[in-house]
Image (cartoon, grey):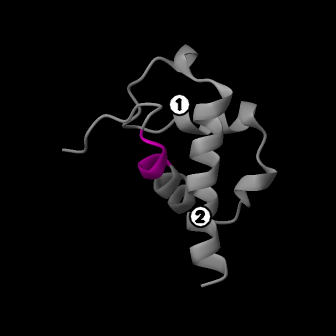
Amino acid sequence: MPKPLTWNDAEDIGILLSEIHPELDPLTVRFTDLHRYVTALPDFKDDPAASNEGKLEAIQMAWHEEFQDRTVG
């Protein structure tokens, strides 16, 4: 059973988003859409209102790293 995800699990969330949305460049995703993508993850169990710009940016950067690995490397 997968562990519940929270806003602090940026790396795990970034990997999942990269798998679910492989065609999206994370740097083009608005934070409002990113918030929606994260809260829609089946294992996301945190309070949707507990996000902030720093947490969303950390998730976006983790996702971007996965995107880079997939498209460049």
Name the residue nearer the viewer: 59 or 32.
59
Image position of 34 (left or right of 12): right
Decide: is 52 above or below 70: above
Q: Give residue 63's position: percent from left, percent from top.
A: 58, 56
Residue appearing at x 37%, y 36% in the figure: 5
Tell me where residue 25 appears, x and y as whole percent: 74, 61
Q: Residues within 10 Å of mark 2 (few under 14, many from 20)?
A: some
**If you read the primary sequence from the N terminus, does the residue marked by circle 2 or circle 1 appear first?**
1
Residue 32 visible in the shown view: yes
What residue does disc 2 label?
65
Q: Callout 1: few (<14), some (14-19), or many (20+) C-alpha neighbours within 10 Å?
A: some
Hey, which quadrant is residue 68 in on the image? bottom right
Q: At 62% across and 36% down in the image, what residue appears?
A: 56
* Residue type highlighted by circle 1: Thr
State the residue in front, 65 or 23: 65
The type of residue carrying mark 2 is Glu
Quadrant in which the N terminus appears:
top left
Label 2 with label 1: CB-CB less than 8 Å: no
Q: Position of residue 41 (x, y in %)?
A: 47, 39
Is 45 on the left or on the right of 29, as rendered? left
Q: Position of residue 69 (x, y in %)?
A: 57, 75
Is residue 49 rendered magenta in the image? no
Q: Which residue is mark 1?
A: 39
- Of all residues shown, which one is farthest toward the front? 54
Near-viewer residue (1 or 57):
57
Please report the residue visible at 57 percent of the width from the left and 23 percent of the height from the top.
51
The magenta-colored residue range is 9-13
Q: Which mark is residue 28?
A: none
User: Is most of the magenta stretch helix, strand or loop?
Assistant: helix
Magenta stretch: includes residue 11: yes
